[in-house]
Image (cartoon, rainbow, N blue to C red):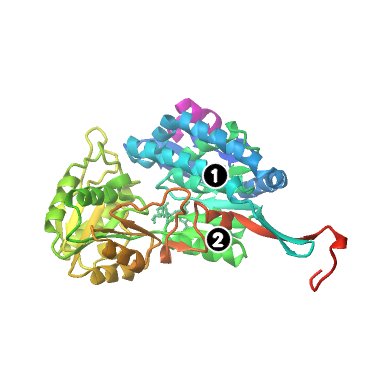
Amino acid sequence: MQTAISEPVTSTSNAAGKYGRIKNFIDGQFTGSAATRSIPVISPLDGALLAEMPCSSAADLDAAVRSARTAFPRWSRTPIKERVQVFFRYKYLLEKNLQELAALVSEENGKTMGEAIAEIEKCIELTEFATSLPQLVTGEVLEVSKGVECRTEHAAVGVVASIVPFNFPAMVPNWTIPNALALGNCMILKPSEKVPLSVTRIALLLKEAGLPDGVLNIVNGDREIVEAICDHPGIEAVSFVGSTKIAKIVYQRSTSHFKRCLALGGAKNHLLVLPDAKPDMTAQNVAASMSGCAGQRCMAASAMVAVGDVDAIIDKICAEARKIVPGTNLGAVIDKAAKERITRYITEAEEQGAKILVDGRGATVPGKENGTYIGPTVIDQVTPDMAIAKDEVFGPVISILHVNTLDEALAIENASPYGNAASVFTQNGSYARYVIDHASAGMVGINVGVPVPREPFPFGGWNESKFGVGDITGKSSIEFWTRLKKSTVKWNPEAGTNWMS
Ligand code: NAD
């Protein structure tokens, strides 16, 4: 694995860690950056220095945009049935390289190998959807008056950008790359500075699959390059996935330059547990939702609202949480700052009167003392005014709030400014339907702890979890990655004339 990553995509120097200094991917080549600053890439698993990531300059972005603009006319005019052949081959290469890619995801992000394998399997599913796009963009045609036809076609937008977060180093880039490119766009991808390695491997696989040079370009960097993307006149559309704070900045800045923008933000997801919920299934789902990927999923359960007496289920949740062991079936959080932030939230809640039922603070893994681990944490008697009840904690922590009615539970859920996911655990169909109708979230689960819609259903939240129109995956992503061309056609002059022709 090391050879595949370090040879073509980085310049190796021991001082820069196992994989050396990362290169950008511009015009189909791995190229050095004009960066004067760089950021170390640290493995959360054990604190090892993996690589050095250059903070690329505006000149690097210019080169990438030039390459993408040059590639665009030919790529966008290639028939979609030919374009998707690249993604059939890419899907096969993802399958072939699954273990290697998963190991890299785990190493740079800190998730367990099992979670990393599931992430690559999701990349495969996303790519499979992209190969079905020819069936979904057939357009419409109708004879609107004698001898006159109107038709619609989906045309590519142009050069688009995709700015991605740290928590899914391979999956979130694959939310955008296959669909946007299959639909004829060329892309500038800006990886997270915390996990820039997996996407370099993805670029190599796409090249091997036959993607023409310039169709995908990767520019590494941080805030400076994101701002340059929002401002660049050669980029027509910007997609962003990350925290709400930065989503707002990116949405405002790129739309101020009249670009289309879809910016997905953070989340605070509520699980409502009713007394008739199936105890074992509920406990397993709550524990898995709050601790999977160390709680660093935008769909993770963060607050559980206990409706009435569900104490027996809470006991089972604690029992499930105690089976989750850092370094074994629980990965690390991304860095020291994240570990400190999560620990602060728990301690502050405790000081304010919350009861820690399972305490993950201070977790360490023997032999990996420099890893950034935090154990599963279950906190009871949390009240809606506490910061831990309102903020996105982004760690393996569940806060339990108590109410007497379903409407009170929904009022807590509705009060959150976010709106990614909400779930209810119950055996009563009318309560379940009531939650679908009244939760203020884009994705609702019934007895499902992580209600991520699978392809072809789209992914996207509401409220401050998403800015812009449409969703980022599935069928509704077609609206974002294309624009409709409407043509009105008359070939037969003998057809006569009427009021419109
Ligand atoms: P982040 O907002 O810190 O970073 C996201 C991207 O923005 C990165 O590429 C980063 O380099 C860039 N960035 C960071 N600070 C910036 C600044 N000041 N100006 C311009 N660009 C900046 O997010 P993160 O910590 O990498 O990821 C975790 C967050 O992403 C969580 O809030 C999580 O909920 C969210 N997320 C949301 C979804 C969703 O579908 N809604 C999916 C995954 C992650």
Q: Quadrant of the N terminus?
A: top left
Q: Secondary structure at mark 1?
A: helix
Front-lying residue, 486 or 498: 498
Q: Which residues are magenta?
A: 1-18
Is residue 52 highlighted in magenta? no
Q: x and y percent of residue 226 in the render?
A: 53, 55
The answer to whether residue 56 of the structure is visible from this angle is no
Who's the residue at 45% across and 44% down the image? 171
Q: Residue furthest right?
A: 494
Q: Is residue 464 above or below residue 87?
A: below
Please state if 49 lies on the left or on the right of 67 as rendered.
left
Q: Is residue 127 above or below residue 428?
A: above
Which residue is denoted by mark 1 in the rendering? 130
The answer to whether residue 265 of the structure is visible from this angle is yes
- Dot 2 amino acid type: Cys
Q: Residues within 10 Å of mark 1 (few under 14, many from 20)?
A: many
Is residue 11 highlighted in magenta? yes
Q: x and y percent of residue 248 in the render?
A: 47, 64
Q: x and y percent of residue 408 in the render?
A: 24, 71
Instruction: Single out the mark in the foreground, 2 or 1.
Output: 1
Q: State whether the magenta stretch is mostly helix, strand or loop.
A: helix
Q: CA distance from mark 2 to mark 1?
A: 21 Å
Which residue is denoted by mark 2 in the rendering? 261
Q: x and y percent of residue 443 in the render?
A: 38, 58
Q: Quadrant of the C terminus?
A: bottom right
- Dot 1 amino acid type: Ala
